[in-house]
Amino acid sequence: IVHQAISGSSVSDPDLLLTKLPSTATNKLHILVVDHEVPRYDENAGARHTYHYICLLLEMGAAITFMPFVESDGDDEAAEKLEALGVEVLRQKAFNGEWELQHWFEWIARNRETLDKVFIHRPHIAGCFMSFCKQELGLPIWYMCHDLHYLRLKRQAELENKPDLLSASDQ
């Protein structure tokens, strides 16, 4: 069941999900995980969710690179915890503090040949990365919304009587 949830298909042999063809340099599937920030699993359910999926994929034998959409206070400690598990965590500091979305696109394009899948979390991240990764680079996408974002926005709009939020929930 877990493998079906992750892959979106009914793979009966979990090794097939995370194994490359024998002609590739490494048998580990390389997954780029993109989320809002480095998951601090003790702060919110979404971060805990991301963290546990990363751990599950590592246990299944995948190589993981984590790309945070933004940098926040506390990222260094959270990144060190992921790195201790064997995750490569990309840091915006590598761009001399001049971070722009284009820098991430350039990194992904430069490393396209080493990436097998992109695991995108949350709607606002998907809006930025999905078409670039899928249409321009041909990378398979896994998407995790974390919650029923549209429903949460709709209910918030109704409670707070905010028509702009209501229209945003329909997008």
Image (cartoon, grey):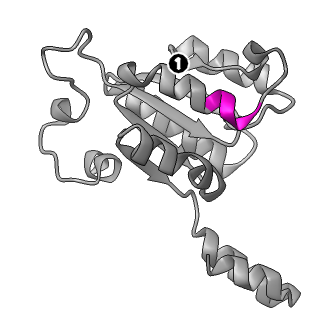
Q: How many marks?
A: 1
> Can residue 51 be seen here?
no
Q: Residue at the spot x=78%, y=28% of the render?
A: 99
Residue beneath disc 1: 87
Counting from the top left corner in percent of width and height, residue 50 is at 56, 41
SS class, disc 1:
loop
Q: Quadrant of residue 17?
A: top left
Q: Residue at the spot x=21%, y=25% of the render?
A: 19
Q: Residue at the spot x=76%, y=36% of the render?
A: 70
Q: Quadrant of the C terminus?
A: bottom right
Q: Is residue 116 left or right of residue 154?
A: left
Q: In this rendered view, identify the residue nearer to me: 120 or 77.
A: 120
Counting from the top left corner in percent of width and height, residue 49 is at 56, 46
> What secondary structure is the stretch in magenta mostly built from?
helix
Q: Amino acid at mark 1?
A: Val
Q: In this rendered view, identify the residue nearer to me: 75 or 106.
A: 106
Q: Quadrant of residue 48?
A: top right
Q: In this rendered view, identify the residue nearer to me: 67 or 158.
A: 67
Instruction: State which region is magenta.
Output: 100-104
Q: Is residue 137 left or right of residue 160?
A: left
Local packing at callout 1 (Cα closer than 10 Å; few below 14, some 14-19, many 20+) is many
Furthest toward the front, the residue is 136
Q: Quadrant of residue 104?
A: top right
